[in-house]
Amino acid sequence: MPSIAPPIPDVRPVQTSLLAPRLAVTLGLAALADWLFYNERIGISLALFAVVLMGCSLLANRAASSSRRSLLAVVIAVAGIIPAIEELNLLSLALLVLALGVAVSIGTNPGLYGLADRTRALRELLLFGPFRLIRDVAGSVSMPAVATGFAVWFVPVVLGAVFVALFASANPLIEKWFALLNPGNAASQVNLTRMLFWIAMLSVVWPFIQVRWRRKAVTPAAAIEPVAEESSTRSDGNLVDFFGTATILRSLILFNLLFAVQTILDVIYLWGNAALPADITYAAYAHRGAYPLIVTALLAAGFVLIAMRPGGPAEQSPVIRPLVYLWVAQNVMLVISSMLRLDLYVQTYLLTYWRIAAFIWMLLVAVGLVLIVVRIALRYSDEWLIRANLITLFGTLYICSLVNFAAIMANYNVSHSRQAGGKGVSVDMHYLTLLGPQALPAIDKALQLRYVADPSLVSHRNCLVERLQQDMNSWRAWSFRSWRLQRYIATREQQQVPAS
């Protein structure tokens, strides 16, 4: 019989002797994050935390590292931290997270080669790693049944708590109910939001401290097929444990109940205009929750995609599929309610580019949720879902490129302003002029209102007309939209010339 070289083992179990110090380091980093971030403005503090996290990661996993790879890891981490020091924004944050992931993978794993391996390693570290804390701790003390129980309930409890926190921030009624639960004793000092923050930070920090990589087996050609099958089963184990049928079923039952509370409240108070408690205004209820509810819908969509992945254990379940359809339907209702909330907000505070973008984004989220249902119902592939969403996105962008948003915003703001008898606030003349020449028809309408006879507005209007004429003087700057506006200006000037 040909000899088969044993595969390189997964670096999976947590050594009991190292468990306590690594947990202590993780708790210390969570405490540092609490001091740096909780209820504080974030800037250079994130770069400081990244430096400490990277240093602790290399020290905790120094047995799997070497001086050369550690130096390269430090260089990559520093390169990723520099943009966050310069200015913290979404781009610099993404670069920082990516650099930390790459640096940890290089500094602690000599067995990764090629882009595909490193991409899988980053996925394990950044996406699945935060779900490892409970299982690693439970598995290290030889409690398989307890570990399984934690794995089954970890996702529904943690995500359920996140959804509850989002609903409380979006709905003053739910927030009031939580306030009524405080008995006024020492237990009432426990802050739900802070607890969620600590849970999130412990989960995020742990995979950097207890680094675990999966390595490919080195076997003869004759043994490639069975080993590959075993490796596939193992590499998917992390996902199966936390997103198996039992976990998904419990999650969907809990999530449907939580979302039903929010849906019923919206039906009663937002759609039905029922009387709210005396200390909660209708405006506060309607205006407060548009954006948190959209975050809730996006988290729900991500969970559905992971739980109902093609070939997964939950896809064939006759019980889970109806629960998924019900939950997605509630999420679509949530998005529609968010759009209504934003519409009520716009009726009072008028339109801006960001509010129009929010409307479009909410519509895309709703379409994406419907497409997820179509993929599950018709058993299409994830590639189909990505392609359908890209077609929807580019179709939306193409339509938006043909829409004159500046003119729409200007006309809406003037027509719905307090001066025009609308429900909105006073029209912002400065913002009108910032919209450019396309706002000229709305500015003319505003000048006709007797309460808006502002000499400075007339001066700004003339500047915009002059700017339009300068643009149209060159054929290179010609556009059909500007030509139509020029025709409007010419017609209006002819109407205002007195008959001789």
Image: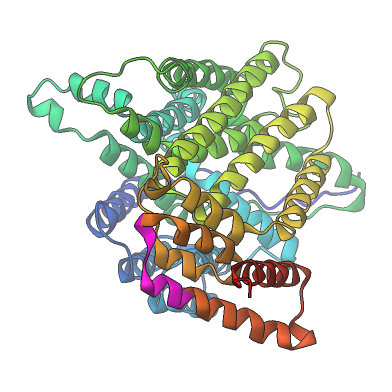
Query: Against 196, is 462 above or below?
Result: below
Rendered image coloring scheme: rainbow
**Where does residue 60 sit, x and y in percent of width and height?**
40, 60
Q: Position of residue 124 (x, y in %)?
A: 60, 50
Q: Quadrant of residue 199?
A: top left
The residue furthest left is 185
The residue depicted at 79 percent of the width and 31 percent of the height is: 375
472 to the left or right of 160: right
Give 282 or 250, whichever is nearer the viewer: 282
Q: Which residue is at a point 58% across and 77% down the rendered structure image?
A: 465
**Quadrant in which residue 178 is drawn:** top left
Number of labels in the image equals 0
Q: Residue at x 53, y 67 (%)?
A: 435
Position of 226 compared to 153: left or right? right
Which of the pair 134/12 is nearer the observer? 134
- For the N terminus, give its image quadrant: top right
> Split into 4 quadrants, where in the image is the C terminus?
bottom right
Q: Find out whether residue 317 is within the magenta segment.
A: no
355 or 73, which is in the foreground?
A: 355
For residue 216, say whether it is visible.
yes
Secondary structure mainly formed by the magenta segment: helix
Q: Of all residues shown, which one is farthest toward the top?
A: 319
Q: Position of residue 462 (x, y in %)?
A: 51, 78
Does 288 sit left or right of 396 as displayed? Answer: left
Q: Measuring from the top left, give residue 140's x and y in whole percent.
A: 43, 37
Q: Which region shows up in magenta?
A: 451-460
